[in-house]
Amino acid sequence: MQLRNSDDRYGAVSLTLHWLTVALVALAWGLGQGMDLLPRGEPRAAGLVVHISAGLAVLALTVARILWRMVDPAPAPAPTRFGSALDWASRLVHAVIYGLLLLVPIAGIVVQFGRGRPLPLFGLGQIPSPWPADRAFARAVLGNHELLANVVILLALAHALAALAHHWLLKDRTLHRMMPHLVRDPR
């Protein structure tokens, strides 16, 4: 598999960054939704460290994806009978998703610091909070963090459904070009 994008499909770097982001967003969101189900104490603390680590990894991967996209532009959209309107909508949704993939982890960092707690760095160390605890502020930011995380999930699901619609209804190669070569293209 080629490392860089070609005219008709994404390369290994783009695919790896995309699917790692998908997995880490799912992990972070799932832990965020189920954190209260974990027993108090060490299990919940460990769950929070994993949640924060996944969020930090999403932030780093998103920055890497943006930088990589500047160096290696995406293939041109597959032509459809809907023309440029669908292309415009796709670019808009992608931009919003990228923005949210930056905002959600940043809001999570602010929540942690707003609680006056250090930011754990993948269990290897931590960054102390730069300001004293402000629980009301942290709670307000947490509400936004959760809302934006849910919007990311909804947009990601819409994005996946659009890819399936391309494949099954429009019968173009949009879905195939984002899949690893392990999936054989029947066309």
Image: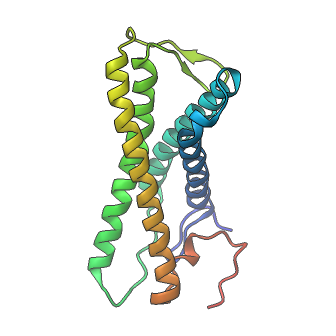
Residue 15 falls in which quadrant of the image? bottom right
Residue closer to the observer: 25 or 41: 41
Compared to 8, does 149 lie above or below? above
Q: Residue at 45%, 48% (x, y): give it.
A: 67
- The residue lying at 38 percent from left, 8 percent from top is 132
- Name the foreground residue: 122 vs 137: 137
**On screen, 185 above or below 141?**
below
**Where residue 21 sits: x, y (%)?**
56, 51
Residue 184 figure quarter: bottom right
Q: Residue furthest top?
A: 132
**Which of the pair 8/183 is nearer the observer?**
183
Q: How many marks?
A: 0
Say how the picture is coloured.
Answer: rainbow
Task: Examine the rendered structure and indicate whether residue 185 appears above or below residue 56.
Answer: below
* x and y, in percent, of residue 26 in the image: 57, 50
Q: Residue at x 47, y 64 (%)?
A: 157
Residue lying furthest right: 182
Q: Position of residue 96 (x, y in %)?
A: 34, 55
Residue drawn at x 43%, y 67% as measured from the top left: 158
- Rendering coords of residue 115 (x, y %): 43, 17
Looking at the rendered image, the quarter that the C terminus falls into is bottom right
In the rendered image, the quadrant that contains the N terminus is bottom right
